[in-house]
Structure formats: structure tokens, C-alpha cells
Image (cartoon, rainbow, N blue to C red):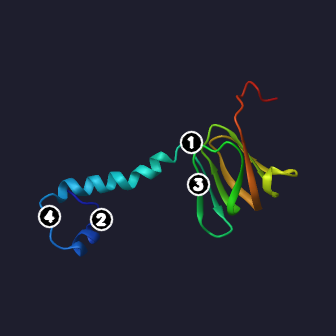
Amino acid sequence: MRIHPGVRGSARVAGPVLPFAPVLLPLLLLVAAAPAQAAAGDFQYVGQDDKVHGLTAPQGCVAAKGGGSRAATNSTRGTATFYREPGCAGRPAAVLEPGAAGQIKPYFASVRFSFITKAQRP
């Protein structure tokens, strides 16, 4: 069995190889990859608190925990409209189409997710 060089050092530190290690390692890698696969259709952003925040299946107006700033990724099927005021009030600060990512400067306090088809857009 061939071990990736990045994992090899961790395996040496762990101590002796257990008889079930060839089965356990792929299982652990699969579990670690699961959250990345589940993120499809989600919305992620970096907050002013320097933490990555994520929303699963967001709908309507959503408050940006940690105060949104910098990078945002819209992997939903809807348009994300960013507002500097809570409750999606005031003028929109930015818009990210479905599947787009970008920098939202200087910050945002809330995001409205609207799900309209291309045929419905003006």
C-alpha cells in the first residue's frame, strides 16, 4: 500500500501499524472529505472575526454572523444580494450570481437569497 507523503509523517508519529490500518486510513480520508462534498449548494464567507462561516440551504434574508467581509462563495442555485445593514435593509452593496465567488468590500451585515430562473430575469 502506498501512502501519500503528507500522511506518511503522521503515520510514523502514530506508532506501530495496526493490522486494520489499511482499512482505517481510507475510511478516515473519506470521512474528512465528506464535509467538502456536502458544501455543494451552500454559501460560505469570511467574517470580520476572521472565521469561515457557512450556511446550508439559505433562504430569504440571513444575518451574517461574525460580520461578513472579504471573500464569499455562492454555491447555491440562487442569487446572493449583500447589504451593509441588518435585515437586508438599505441599498444592495454587492450581488453574487449562483456559482460565483468574490470579494465583498468593505463588509456586509446580511444577505438575501433569491431563487429565480434565468427566464424570469430581466
Q: Amino acid at mark 3?
A: Gly
Q: Is residue 1 visible?
A: no
The numbered mark, 2 or 1, whose residue comes first in the sequence reads 2
Position of the C terminus, as image quadrant, is top right
- Asked which secondary structure carries label 4, the reply is loop
As measured in the structure, the alpha-carbon distance from the residue carrying label 3 to the one carrying label 2 is: 27 Å
Residue 35, given in percent of the width and then of the height, sits at 45, 52
The numbered mark, 4 or 1, whose residue comes first in the sequence reads 4
Q: Is residue 36 visible?
A: yes
Q: Amino acid at mark 2?
A: Val
Tag of residue 54 = 3
Residue 115, given in percent of the width and then of the height, sits at 69, 34
**Residue found at x 51% / y 48%:** 39
Q: Amino acid at mark 4?
A: Leu
Q: Amino acid at mark 1?
A: Gly
Decide: marks 2, 1 in contact (CB < 8 A)?
Answer: no
Tag of residue 41 = 1
The numbered mark, 3 or 2, whose residue comes first in the sequence reads 2
Decide: marks 2, 4 in contact (CB < 8 A)?
Answer: no
Q: Is residue 23 above or below residue 113?
A: below
122 vs 84, nearest the viewer: 84
- Asked which secondary structure carries label 3, the reply is strand
Please tell me how crowded label 3 is: few (under 14), some (14-19), or many (20+) other residues with Cα within 10 Å.
Answer: some
Residue receiving disc 2: 7
Position of the N terminus, as image quadrant, is bottom left
**Residue found at x 33% / y 66%:** 6
Viewer-nearest of discs 2 and 1: 1
